[in-house]
């Protein structure tokens, strides 16, 4: 598939690049790295995202060129759908994007049925950014400093700062090559992790009292309500990283962040340690992800949702 995608890039001229809602470092870093690569080849490229770029990723080269209004689609030869397991994850413009003649999906999530004309999917990859590295290498393209910064950010964030189980040899080798290509690990880490706005810290203070430990202390969770967001002046993007906090507690194997979306909907971000499979839990509610990192959305009252999720975790553990 690397050869096929390389041929498609060579033949096509006008590209759209997009990724999932609620943008993270992998989605943005992958989009912008691919943008810079295609532009350097003389291609016409538009990066479209439904959501605003989170503050801590606006340092990425090219982030100011991302558009949030989808332009007329007649001129596009192909579209790259990045870091998505299904087309609907790009948001409200999914149906329009589906009309572009050639759709190329690059993703590393287990729950991906292959919804595009061409797909590069590897659940063993740490990130979509790592797959973009493979495409560049296959094409003999040495990443520029801008690309290196974007791709290092993608790998860094999706491996949790090189702490998660997906920090495999390929991720570390790719990161080393990107540092050689101009990525500055300290500067990138400071921008991603050490540039929190005051509203995020206020929100964290409001959320910590919701900490709950279940399953004899092996399941930890936090809850972010719409009321907490409004009271602290925070945005949904400011919850990034919150799901990891309960997991730092000794004995906790599964960490859950319940985020109220409104109209009775909650988004669940789920993380785990070791070989605890939370992708199976998320899949039970129509979501997906990886063994140690998954997400889903559930409608209902929070106490009932919590009960259903804890039961799903128990059932998943019984199947292992």
Image: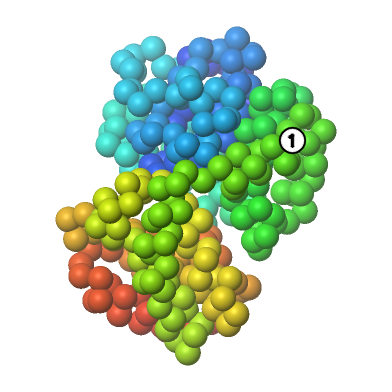
Residue 273 quadrant: bottom right
Could you tell me which residue is drawn at 59 percent across and 25 percent down? 61
Secondary structure, mark 1, is: loop
- The residue wearing badge 1 is 184
Query: In the depicted view, which residue is nearer to us: 126 or 104?
Result: 126
Residue 287 versus residue 6 in the image, above or below: below
- Specify whether 236 is left or right of 117: left
Q: Quadrant of the N terminus?
A: top right
**Is any atom of residue 156 visible in this view?**
yes
Q: Residue at x 58, y 82 (%)?
A: 251
How crowded pointer 1 is (Cα within 10 Å; few <14, some 14-19, many 20+) is rated as: some
Question: Is the image coloured rainbow, by chain, by secondary structure, or in one colour?
Answer: rainbow
Q: Which residue: 51% across, 46% down?
A: 196
Residue positioned 46% across, 75% down in the render: 220
x%, y% of residue 91? 32, 39
**In the image shown, does 312 or 220 lie closer to the viewer?**
220
Q: Residue furthest left?
A: 263
Res. 136 in view: no
Eyeballing the image, is 2 above or below 199?
A: above
Residue sitting at the far bottom: 216
Q: x%, y% of residue 52? A: 38, 34
Number of marks: 1
Give residue 192's position: percent from left, percent from top.
58, 43
Image quarter for residue 7?
Answer: top right
Residue extending furthest top? 42
Rendering quarter of residue 143: top right
């Amino acid at each position: 598939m690397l050869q096929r995608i390389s041929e498609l890039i060579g033949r096509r001229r006008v590209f759209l690049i997009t990724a999932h809602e609620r943008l993270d470092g992998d989605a943005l870093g992958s989009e912008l790295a691919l943008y810079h690569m295609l532009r350097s080849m003389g291609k016409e490229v538009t990066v479209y995202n439904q959501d605003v770029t989170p503050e801590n990723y606006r340092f990425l080269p090219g982030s100011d060129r991302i558009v949030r209004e989808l332009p007329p689609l007649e001129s596009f030869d192909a579209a790259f759908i990045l870091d998505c397991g299904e087309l609907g994850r790009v948001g409200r413009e999914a149906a329009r994007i589906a009309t572009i003649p050639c759709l190329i999906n690059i993703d590393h999530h287990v729950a991906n049925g292959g919804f595009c004309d061409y797909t590069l999917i590897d659940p063993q990859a740490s990130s979509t950014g790592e797959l973009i590295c493979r495409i560049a290498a296959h094409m003999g393209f040495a990443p520029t400093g801008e690309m290196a910064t974007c791709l290092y950010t993608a790998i860094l964030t999706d491996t949790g700062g090189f702490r998660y189980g997906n920090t495999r040899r390929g991720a570390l080798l790719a990161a080393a090559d990107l540092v050689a290509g101009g990525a500055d690990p300290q500067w990138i880490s400071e921008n991603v992790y050490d540039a929190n706005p005051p509203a995020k810290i206020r929100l964290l203070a409001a959320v910590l009292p919701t900490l709950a430990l279940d399953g004899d202390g092996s399941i930890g969770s936090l809850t972010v309500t719409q009321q907490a967001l409004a009271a602290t002046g925070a945005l949904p993007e400011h919850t990034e990283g919150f799901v990891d906090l309960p997991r730092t507690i000794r004995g906790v194997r599964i960490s859950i962040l319940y985020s109220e979306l409104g109209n009775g909907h909650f988004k669940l971000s789920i993380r785990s340690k070791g070989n605890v499979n939370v992708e199976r839990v998320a899949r039970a509610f129509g979501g997906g992800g990886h063994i140690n990192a998954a997400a889903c959305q559930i409608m209902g009252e929070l106490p009932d949702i919590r009960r259903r999720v804890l039961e799903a975790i128990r059932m998943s553990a019984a199947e292992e």
